[in-house]
Amino acid sequence: MADAIKLNIDGTDVETQPGTTIIDVATEAGIEIPKLCQHRLLSANGTCRMCLVEVEGARTLLTACTTPVQPGMKVSTRSEQVLRARRSVLEFLLAEHSLDCLVCERSGDCRLQDYAYEYGADGRQIAGKHYERGVEEPGEVEADNPFFVRDMSKCILCGRCVRMCAEVMGYGAVDFASRGAETKVATSFEMPLTESSCVFCGNCVTACPTGALQPKQGARQGRAYEYEKVRTICPYCGVGCSINLHVRDGRIIGSSAVEGPANRGLVCVKGHFGHGWIQDEDRLTRPLVRKDDGELHPTSWDEALDLVAERLRTIKSKHGSDAIGGLASAKCTNEENYLFQRFMRSCVATNNVDHCARLCHASTVAGLATVFGSGAMTNSNWEFESSDVLFITGSNTTETHPVIGAVVERGRRAGAKLIVADPRVTDMAYRADLHLQHHPGSDIALLNAMAHVILAEGLEDKEFIENRTEGFAEVKEKVAEYSPERAAELTGVPAADIIEAARMFARERRGAVLYSMGITQHSKGVDNVKAIANLAMLTGNIGRFATGVNPLRGQNNVQGACDMGCIPSHLPGYQLVSKKELRSKFERAWGSPLRADPGLTMIEMINEAADGGLRALYIMGENPMLADPDITHVKEGLENLDFLVVQDVFLTETAQLADVVLPAASFAEKSGTFTNTERRVQLVRPAVSSPGEAKADWRILCDLAARFGQSWGYEESAEIMSDLSALTPSYGGISYDRLDPVGLQWPCPDADHPGTPILHTETFARGKGLFSPVDHRPPAEVPNGEFPIVLTTGRMLYHFHTGSMTRRAPSLHAHVPTGYVEVNEQDAGHLGIEHGQPVKVISRRGGVVTQAVVTPNIKQGVVFMPFHFAEAAANVLTNTALDPVAKIPELKVCAVRLEPQPWEGARGCCCETSGESDAFEATNEGSD
Amino acid sequence: MKESAKKVKAILAKYPDSGRDALIPILQDIQDELGYLPTSAIMQVGAHLALPSSKIYGVATFYNQFRFQPKGRNHITICRGTACHVKGSGKLLENAVATLKIKPGQTSRDKLFSLETVACMGACGLAPVITVNDEFNAKASPAKLNRLARCCKDEITQERENS
């Protein structure tokens, strides 16, 4: 480390590292220098001039945000000259600024207002034409998108939004246009944002120091000093962003991003603007019971719970406890999932407990547990900004994990190479140095061929392989069969690109692999994961900073639900039910005998239900009627049950089939913890009370357990955490008082352990990393004459999962009101399908009508559908073929055909604004 | 592919593997070819140079030389240099805007006129100066400008009657 630099600020001696700017060292020393354009995530541009300071010997005042420290510097941050200069800076800004603080939403949360007050500037010293014009024409307001308003009469041209969009999010939707006094922040051709590449993350709104950008939510309902901010964790994807819910008079009026360890102040459009569903009028407020007339009727909690207990007991005594199954929820807290599996295992006495991880990362949990000994993301979110090469496969990161997408973008801008393997030209693929557009389901051929090249060219990390791994010889032999030329045939990727990708990945020091459903949702998902692990071990990219095998988890608490043992084979902390000593530990703690044989997985439960083996299902916060493959079959199964209990916040498609519906509290109404994708356990805090009689899931479970003669006696969720941490070694040191404000990353075995950001640093959890030879095999269903096209499914940015939340979030639903199918433009031409035209998509299992989005951004012969939309449910079509180990269905590949339908009404496409212009938008450039 | 898109493609082909430093020459070539910078051309340039289109628009609007609408049949420029300003080019501009019903940078709907201001034409002795289709008109006045505009209109009417 270079020698420290000593300098003096306002009479205080401080020390810092070379290269630090004056503003940073001052902030460290607790001396605040005002700033409008400077932002910790953005490059310094020194435009606002508020941070001017006086440096002894300097010819002029200097901007503290751009001036690096020098030895012996003497800095005054509040000299008379400095204060005068800042005041005149403010006068100039205010002269052009619309001074309508009386009605401005940002009043009280406006840095310009704060400084104007502090420095006594009011904009009357320089009454320029802009000021006059501002008074005459207060509105150049753009308000046509559902998320936020742009009022350029309040823009001070600090460029934070411009840099946020370009440097952090990678979109560059806005930039400075024109020059001189006419300069403004604009999209290209000053189109509305809805026609630009804007993704409405609203990180520009967070960064804006004035009222130029204002969220629409909460408008006229209260200003910053009138509402309470409740810090909690976003309930959407697995990134685990910290957010504030704005609460006034017991109602949530808005939400905003807040600095947290997983998101560093960033959020996406859903986390920022997508919480309107919490107070939707559709929320369940009373328990419902299906009466003799076949309808669901409101009832009391006692009647509903008594009925559940009685029916479950009857079915148990008549058909055995394994005739009952339970689905836990990746949306509920750790505490609730812990209690759910405890209820199933100790009250019902079955291991038939599973949750939606079966549909997403079951392959990861099984695959990585085998090869590394732990089935979780090895590294942490923000390490990727320091990686040298990033290999993203089967993850549309910017849409499904947008904040990690931003971290990757920062890494790329810092010089990291980016390789993306995806059949679609996603934003990430567009930004990539190398895009490998392989056939869906050909991942193993691609990954093996990359390993082949690395070995053939001697680029492997011999020392790592020698010291840290086993089974290398078998893999070496196996990948020898996968020459790039052979892989080119299997994947459709040119051999030269495969070779290039292998070299690019192997030659850099820090290489990280990020993957998601594109790898796992296959009938060979586990083998896909193993092939990724092979590649990472081959190049020694495990156990070090900014490297690793990084499965991006899709739900806010899917990691936690797995950790809490909501899987049929494992107790909390991945402790096998089959191991006697582990089981007896839980038996002692819970005071009831536990079953040793693993239970049924989710898809198996549905199959058993259809076959009559499973008689009752208790579903907490899941919606298999949209999320599971082959919905027609799911419905058959659920309807065949004797008894179905659904506990949820809405009357979902699944709840509509239930015999008893229990109204649950949402994340905003309870305390608990979520575990994000980087294994970070974070606190969830209640902001408002539940509507009607709705109750937190853990309270419902306690009440139900009492009816099975088990009095758990929990009054607070913290007590559940202390019980579960005592039984779960990886959570051993986790307690609520340690979780504020940054949480803890497991494994955290004891109360003094600081948590583990990087797994497998010294040894693997299983000792040595296990190389596993894997072979390419085609997907379970391949195209043929009748079904010539491959359908792949996934998420899109503006909606989440089965849409029960996002489709009730007014802004998100207004922006993207319905589903679609993406069709390659060549294919569309051959099939006679036009953009926006209704088409019927038909597979062996059913057909749905939706509208076509004709695009060059998808491989020929492949179509894509998001699965959020009940009216065009992609999962009517998908295949239930399972991975033999993980039992994950092949949601990513099935064969379909398209039939164009006659136009109804006006031609046009609802998604016109959400994707089309993006195709042309490039992303490589930041602001100056 | 539209004719103009083909032309832009041909221009971009002259700048293979280029970075942002090729942006201004490319925009100049396109304007020379098409007479202005259409939206679609900027999108094409963005895809070619991997630049956001907002950035390109920002650069293009920074320089006076780029237009975003096709020129009118009669392109009028009004000098706003110091000498011309002193000699009343401000009034001249106001009058032009009122008569032609277009702002600087715009083209009238009938495509007859386009209007532009320039910083200085270097003909300060003749101030205030305007040009119509690159022809200089010295010591211009609102009345003179109106006359010129009327001439242009008459010319069109004449042509239509003849044809």
Image (cartoon, rainbow, N blue to C red):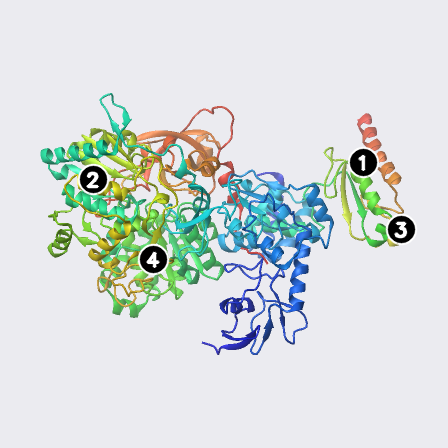
Amino acid of disc 4: Leu
Check if mark 2's residue and mark 4's residue have beta carbons within 8 Å.
no
Q: Is residue A595 visible?
A: yes
Q: Report the quarter where the N terminus of chain A lies.
A: bottom left
The Cα–Cα distance between marks 1 and 3, rounded to whole angstroms, is 23 Å
* Residue B83 on image: x %, y %: 86, 53
Q: Is residue A38 above or below residue B31?
A: below
Q: What residue would you read off at disc 4? A: A739
- Determine crowd level at label 1: few under 14, some 14-19, many 20+ residues with C-alpha closer than 10 A: few
Q: What residue would you read off at disc 1? A: B99
Q: Residue at x 31, y 30 (%)?
A: A846
Discs 1/2, front: 2
Q: Is residue A892 above or below residue B157?
A: below
Amino acid of disc 2: Leu
Amino acid of disc 1: Thr
- Give the number of the disc on residue B126: 3
* Residue A255 on image: x %, y %: 45, 46
Q: Report the quarter where the C terminus of chain A lies.
A: bottom right
